[in-house]
Amino acid sequence: MSTQGKRLKNIRETLKLTQAELGAKLGISKQFYSNIETDRTLLNNEKLVLLFKDYNVNLNYLLGGILPMFNDTKEDDFELKVKNVLYKVGLI
């Protein structure tokens, strides 16, 4: 089974970003980001929302491995989709 860290690494590599670049975008150090990819820690809700908003990452994929990796989201239903996904996975 794939872990959140492995899925995040897949996302980062698909986006052609380094750990330092994605860490900076999320407002965390490269070392902290590396700890996430190696499953020493998890992303918090704020960082999950940034991935969804800035990179259109499918939170179902990131949290549960459900494809597709990215979604086609319209701006007008952004907040509702984020809340629904976070609720379904028990984060709110």
Image (tube, rainbow, N blue to C red):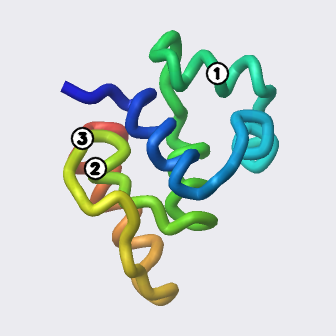
What residue does disc 2 label? 87
Residue beneath disc 3: 64
What amino acid is at disc 1?
Answer: Ser
Marks 2 and 1, how far apart in space?
27 Å
Amino acid, disc 3: Gly
In the displayed structure, 19 sits above or below 11; it is: above
Secondary structure beneath dot 3 equals: helix
**What's the mark number on residue 79?**
none
Which of pointers 1 and 3 indicates the residue nearer the eye? 1
**Quarter that holds the C terminus:** top left
- Image x and y of residue 36, in percent: 55, 23
Return the disc, 2 or 1, that comes first in the chain's sequence.
Answer: 1
Of 35 and 53, the residue lying toward us: 35
Q: What residue is at 37 percent from the left and 72 percent from the top? A: 71
- Judge by depth and name the residue closer to the eye, 63 or 92: 63
Q: CA distance from mark 1 to mark 3?
A: 20 Å
Position of 49 compared to 81: left or right? Answer: right
